[in-house]
Amino acid sequence: MKSKTRFDRRRFLELLSVAGVAVYLPGCGPDDGQPPNNPPASSKKALVLGGGLAGLTAAYDLSKQGWDVTVLEAQASAGGRVQTHRAFENGQYAELGATRIPDVHDLTIAYAEEFGLKLVEFQDGTPLYYLGGNRFVHAEGTPWPIDGLSAEEAMEGLGMWSTYIAANFEKFGNPRDGSFPLPGVVDQWDGKTMIDYLKDQGATDAFLPLYASDNGSEVHKIGALAWMALEVADQDWNLTYHVEGGNDLIVQKLLEKLDGKILFEKVVKSISQDDTKVTVTVDAKGTTETYEADYLVCAIPFPPLRDVTFSPALPDDKQKAIDELYMMTAARGTFQTKTRFWKNDPLGELGGLKLVKSDTRAERVWDLTNTQTGDTGILVAYTQNENADAFGAVPEAEREAFMQAEIAKFFPEIEAEKSSFHQKVWAQDPWVKGAWTAILPGQWWMMAVIPRVEGRIHFAGEHTSIWAGWMQGAIESGKRAASEILKKS
Ligand SMILES: Cc1cc2nc3c(=O)[nH]c(=O)nc-3n(C[C@H](O)[C@H](O)[C@H](O)COP(=O)(O)OP(=O)(O)OC[C@H]3O[C@@H](n4cnc5c(N)ncnc54)[C@H](O)[C@@H]3O)c2cc1C
């Protein structure tokens, strides 16, 4: 395994201070950062709102320090966007959300190690491309068969990452050492999407669908700054792992550690605070219940948080961030297949997690059985942005046929091969209303506001981390929020 770099709280604070902001603004809430009376260990109480990876991490860290912690979770189960679907034959399973663990995501890997979970590596293979109706595989050293590429793009293909992206890393700074974004970077790039950025570097129009087919169509919408922050932070990413048996085993292990501390089917409705405590009301299957504590970690994604009332009201900029933060849309249409027919493709043996990279509505097709045994296969059409919206707009009963028709454009075998189907449209999940945070052009100001402490209320969740859209971000944010509270006591 590669050596790993830790993005710790100190560096996070450096990042924010370089951005010219204070992490905690005295006077923006009723608490000045210190509790009036430091309670003895046994009486320190914290509430954690939301039982996703961020909330569970905060609860775990606080409980390890002797705090009396209660997690309030809206659903009947925990884990949020870490969901492993196990209703397939032959013991096979599919991730509906978090799938990949890059070898540079030290916090996610540390959980797997602490909990004794085995990490398995996704194996490389030859992907199929289906772009502009052209079905091909690419052999190293041969030109990419895409009309309109520049001479360099035709030779390098996706290797243009080095020229268009990596060559500029030093101009941006690095979130891991607190230097991102360097002076002038926000002025230059905050108004641009990642696709605008690529065009500015000289990418041709013909290159863009190739890039999106590898990275996901969200690159058409997400801001260049948010994308480049992660490119720089994870530039040493080499291997990609998965928890053997399913990534939700991390959640299950955390639940064991937090035995009895999680209350399910408690939908948070209001949060109030004064100079001595926080008070939360929940809707518990039609009954209103009230909980009190010294401090609170709010790990609810911002879209459902829009339905929660704060008293006193949050500062205007925080409320604006809650109201305007954009959740990228993503959806997955998953087929179990009778065989792994793509190993006998007319173009040769296909393989790898990213099995197909296309510009169809199916977008990218991933082979989730890449790390699983058995002869049957699991193919997931992993759609984002407009492709996810198009899939979500199809009536539920027609989605299987819709996705099958898209996949049939490059895999006509799908009709005869499929044995079952499952679908998940994240924008229609009421407890997140989207897939992950995407800081859009013009929204970089939110980076300092989103994680800011508001009195006794501390914020966690992937949306509060530079690793937005990753388990690493959820874990990093939960640890940060817990350490903020521990420092106050
Ligand atoms: C399609 C998809 C693909 C992904 N791929 C990867 C990947 O390959 N690798 C990776 O590392 N990460 C990936 N991620 C991202 C990763 O899953 C998330 O970053 C992470 O799980 C977010 O954790 P969280 O705790 O911040 O939020 P969540 O998991 O959303 O947890 C929030 C919790 O709050 C609860 N809640 C909401 N409203 C209320 C309320 N009013 N009251 C009480 N509780 C409430 C929810 O029920 C939920 O349990 C992916 C996500 C998606 C959707």
Image (cartoon, rainbow, N blue to C red):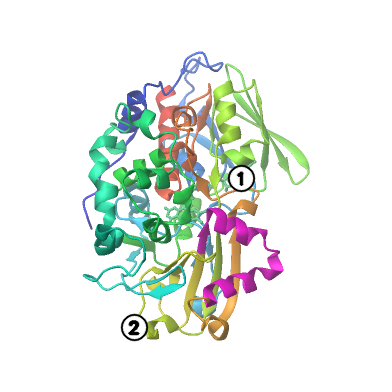
Q: Quadrant of the N terminus?
A: bottom left
Check disc 2 and report its element: helix, strand or loop.
Answer: loop
Q: Quadrant of the C terminus?
A: top left
Residue 392 placement (x, y as % from top left): 64, 59
Q: Say above or below: 105 vs 382.
A: above
Q: Say above or below: 214 vs 3.
A: below
Residue where numbered disc 1 is placed: 73
Is residue 254 visible to us here?
A: yes
Residue 148 placement, left or right of 49: left
Q: Which residues are magenta?
A: 382-408
Tell me the residue at 29%/47% (across/down): 165
Confirm or deny contact between disc 2 and disc 1 (CB under 8 A).
Answer: no
- Answer yes or no: disc 1 within 8 Å of ligand 1: yes
Tell me the residue at 55%/59% (across/down): 387
> Residue flagged by tag 1: what amino acid is it?
Glu
> Residue flagged by tag 2: what amino acid is it?
Gly
Q: Earlier in the sequence, mark 2 or mark 1?
A: 1
Q: Residues within 10 Å of mark 2 (few under 14, many from 20)?
A: few
Residue where numbered disc 2 is placed: 348
Q: Nearer the viewer, mark 2 or mark 1?
A: 2
Tell me the residue at 52%/76% (across/down): 409
> Within the magenta stretch, is there residue 260?
no
Q: Tell me how far mark 2 sits from mark 1, CA to CA.
A: 48 Å
Q: Which of these two is toward me, 83 or 364?
A: 364
Residue 430 placement (x, y as % from top left): 65, 49
Check disc 1 and report its element: helix, strand or loop.
Answer: loop
Instruction: Give the overall secondary structure of the magenta segment.
Output: helix
Is residue 236 visible to us here?
A: no
Q: Which of these two is toward me, 356 or 460?
A: 356
Residue 446 placement (x, y as % from top left): 48, 30
Residue 386 placement (x, y as % from top left): 56, 55
> Within the magenta stretch, is there residue 387?
yes
